[in-house]
Amino acid sequence: MNGHVETVLQSEAKVAAARSVCKIFSPTKDGTLTATGFRVGSRFIMTACHVTSRFLEGHQYAAEKFVVFNYKHESGFNEEDKFHLGKTVFSNLETDISVVELECDSRTLPPPLRLFCSPVSDRGFHLIGHSQGNIMETNFVDKICIDNREKAKLRNEMNEKSINYTGGRHCDCPPHDKIDNPHRFLFLCRFTKGGSGAPGVVLIGNKIYVTTVLLWGYPNWYFDPTMEEKKVNWPVGDCIQQGVNLKSLQEFMFLAYPDLSIDIFGDQPIP
């Protein structure tokens, strides 16, 4: 039998979590960058570090750097769902995660996601985000690779195939954006560019937990616009995505900014 079955409670949990997810708009020299983020802590969003690093390209348009929550309709968005971005208060290359402050006004911010857990190889999760800059979508992920030995084996296999296929291009980007980065894990999903920063959520009991954040896709060159002709014959099924291990993220953040870590994750280690 085909198809994925879920309970109504699981469906309702996704809808509730989606209230905290936003589409990021930031101008760059090549146009407007779009990505995904989600509410955390008292006044922040979390997204991928490689997303916020491109904010610098559009610094002269700082007033236009904003996020939109509830972006569900092709016709556009409501102004009350739009919030400007302030400063980046945390960035970490090993985990490829950044935290950015929202510029608050008299409006109430959308609710933050406050519960977090580590990934489990046999427990799937739902990504919620804006892949390809689209309206908000969800994607169920059930194929997960957490074991470091398996990740290293997969990297060697893909690297050999990538080098042979492209005539020399490696599949990843040392030193941090490597398939076998110990602070990240691998999975298969349909989200791609624009989905970076999307939370992966899971319902445990009757509570919503964030179990990862979508970061990177491999082979890296497959997502390079200059490689469009080359990627035509590469099987899309051979592409792999990567998410952060939130336990590692919490440890890095607590060492650098303990108050911020407690604001976002609370004062207990992620289980």
Image (cartoon, rainbow, N blue to C red):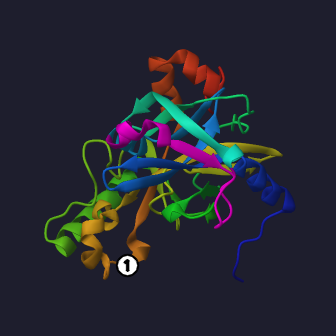
Q: Which residues are magenta?
A: 57-78
Would residue 32 be seen by someone viewing this image from the given angle? Answer: yes
Q: In the image, 148: left or right of 213?
A: left
Which residue, as the protein is rendered here, is positioned at the far right? 8
The picture quadrant where one finds residue 43 is top right
Give the vertical position of 128 relative to 99 (above or below). below
The residue at the far left in this view is: 167
**Badge 1 element:** loop
Residue 127 position, x and y percent, is: 61, 56
Which residue appears at 41% of the width and 40% of the height? 61
Q: Position of residue 204 (x, y in %)?
A: 76, 46
Q: In the rendering, at what x and y percent does residue 171 appear?
A: 27, 60
Q: Which quadrant would the N terminus be assigned to in this image?
A: bottom right
Q: Residues within 10 Å of mark 1 (few under 14, many from 20)?
A: few
* Residue at 19% over, 72% down: 166
Q: Say left or right for 20 vs 177.
A: right
Q: Report the side of 183 relative to 144 (left or right).
A: left
Nearest the eye: 18 or 153: 18
Q: Is residue 67 magenta?
A: yes
At label 1, the amino acid type is Pro
In depth, the one of 25 and 238 nearer the eye is 25
Q: Is residue 105 left or right of residue 64?
A: right
Question: Residue drawn 61% across and 43% down?
Answer: 38
| Residue 20 in view, yes or no | no
Residue 128 placement (x, y as % from top left): 63, 56
The quadrant in which the C terminus is found is: top right
The residue beneath circle 1 is 235
